[in-house]
Structure formats: structure tokens, C-alpha cells
Amino acid sequence: MASIKERFDKWKARKWHQKAGDIFFWVLLIMLVIPGPRKMIATNLNKVMLHLRKPSISNDAGTYQLSANEYNWNINNEKGIPVAPEDLQGEVIFLNFWGTYCPPCIAEMPEIQGIYNDYKDMVKFILVSAESPGKVQNFLDSRGYELPSYYGGNGMPEALSVRSIPTTFIISRDGKIVSKKVGAADWDSKATRRVFDTLLEEG
């Protein structure tokens, strides 16, 4: 078996771009093992990937329509006030499940803020987290986000139940689930605006 010195001498003999690739690989590997840098790398990779993912109205749009009693979502706003079903019915809704510990969620947050800035007076944005309100608000404040936060969601109907985050639904005024997206997406896009504009015109 070759000694460490022999291996190092063999490595030194490699071409410069091969050595640079080796160094990059090992630095990346070490950073992925350490929690802080690992989260940063995952978040930035998701930011790149989400620009490839454009939301759209599903091909099977309208195959499921929420009934009146399926708007009882058991969620509270940031003040701890329960959201009544009648506050949701008849609205175009952007429903997003997320967490501060989730790199894909963090990666798409600037996109959600961007589309929220343009449609907050027309579309009801519901961002639901299972974490404590204090932790979520600290996260939003530290990054300058001004997004409506909701908590709970244990009583969501089956059609809106999620197994992973982020998961996002877009719901029409008449309760049709027209889009479901699992994973991060480029929400601040022409595609999202087309979906919103179409649903708002229908109302």
C-alpha cells in the first residue's frame, strides 16, 4: 500500500485543474458536514433550482372543489386569533406550508415576498408554520420579510394535507384547488401572475 508521502507526490503531479477540482470537492464535503454551511449551501442550491420550476394551473384543475366545511382549517393568525371559514370562502388563496428550518422554504421566501407585494390586496396569502409564533416572527424580521403568518393547521382537510414542506396550493374563489406545488418554486414570475390574473378575472 502506498505511503501518504507517495500519494501526496502523485497528487502533486496532477494537472492544476485536477488539483483545483480535488480541493473544491473536499472543501464542499467538509462544509456539508458542518450544520451552518450545510444549510447555507442547500439554500443557495435551491435558489438556483427554483428558477427552473414555474407554477401553473394544473392539467387536472378543478377536479377537486372544497366544500363549505372544508374551510375550517384550525389556523390562527400572528395575534393568536382563529381564522373563520367565512374569511376564506370566496377568496383567491395562496396557501403555503413552510418552516424556518427548511432550506427550500427559505430559498423561495424572497419569491413569495415579491409576488405578495403585488397581489396582497387581491389574493389572500396564508403561510402556515408548525413552529412557535415567536421563532417565526424573529426569522421574518431578521430578513426583512413582511408576510402574513399563520399557525396550526392540524385540522386541514385531506385534500390540503401535506407530507413535506414547502407545499403550496392555489385555490380559486369557488374552492377549486387549481395548483399544488411540492417543493420550492419561482413564485415571483409571469407564470404566477397569469394564474392569479385568470382566477381574479373569473371572480
Image: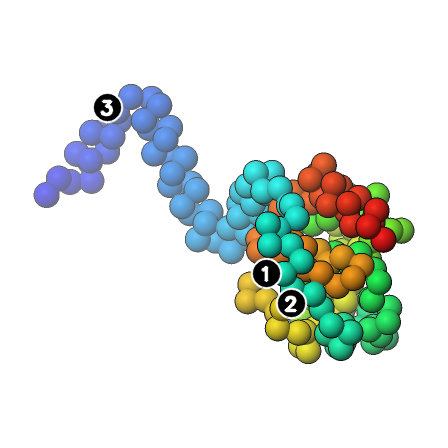
Point out residue 43 in the picture as x, y percentages from the top left corner. 58, 47
For label 2, the SS is helix
Point out residue 32 in the picture as x, y percentages from the top left corner. 45, 49
- Please give the residue where the numbered disc 3 appears in the rendered image: 13
| N-terminal label among 2 and 3 | 3
Amino acid type assigned to the residue bearing label 3 in the image: Ala
Q: Residue visible at 86% across and 71% down?
A: 86
Point out residue 102 in the picture as x, y percentages from the top left corner. 59, 58
Calculate the distance from the C-alpha at mark 3 to the C-alpha at mark 1: 47 Å
**Drawn side of residue 4 relative to residue 162, left or right:** left
Quadrant of res 44: top right
Q: Nearer the viewer, residue 74 or 144?
A: 74
- Please give the residue where the numbered disc 1 appears in the rendered image: 165
Q: Nearer the viewer, residue 30 or 56?
A: 56
**Drawn side of residue 169 relative to residue 19, left or right:** right
Q: Check residue 93 in the rendering and tell me which mark sits there, or answer none.
A: none
User: Which numbered disc, 2 or 1, marks the residue closer to the eye?
Assistant: 2
| N-terminal label among 2 and 1 | 2
Q: Tell me, yes or no, whether the two marked residues, 2 and 3, touch with CB atoms within 8 Å.
A: no
Q: Quarter of the image containing the N terminus?
A: top left
Point out residue 51 in the picture as x, y percentages from the top left corner. 60, 38
Q: Residue visible at 37% across and 28% down?
A: 20
User: Which numbered disc, 2 or 3, marks the residue closer to the eye?
Assistant: 2
Amino acid type assigned to the residue bearing label 2 in the image: Leu
Q: Tell me, yes or no, whether the two marked residues, 2 and 1, touch with CB atoms within 8 Å.
A: no
- Please give the residue where the numbered disc 2 appears in the rendered image: 160
Quadrant of res 80: bottom right
Q: Is residue 173 visible?
A: yes
Amino acid type assigned to the residue bearing label 1 in the image: Ile
Q: Residues within 10 Å of mark 2 (few under 14, many from 20)?
A: some
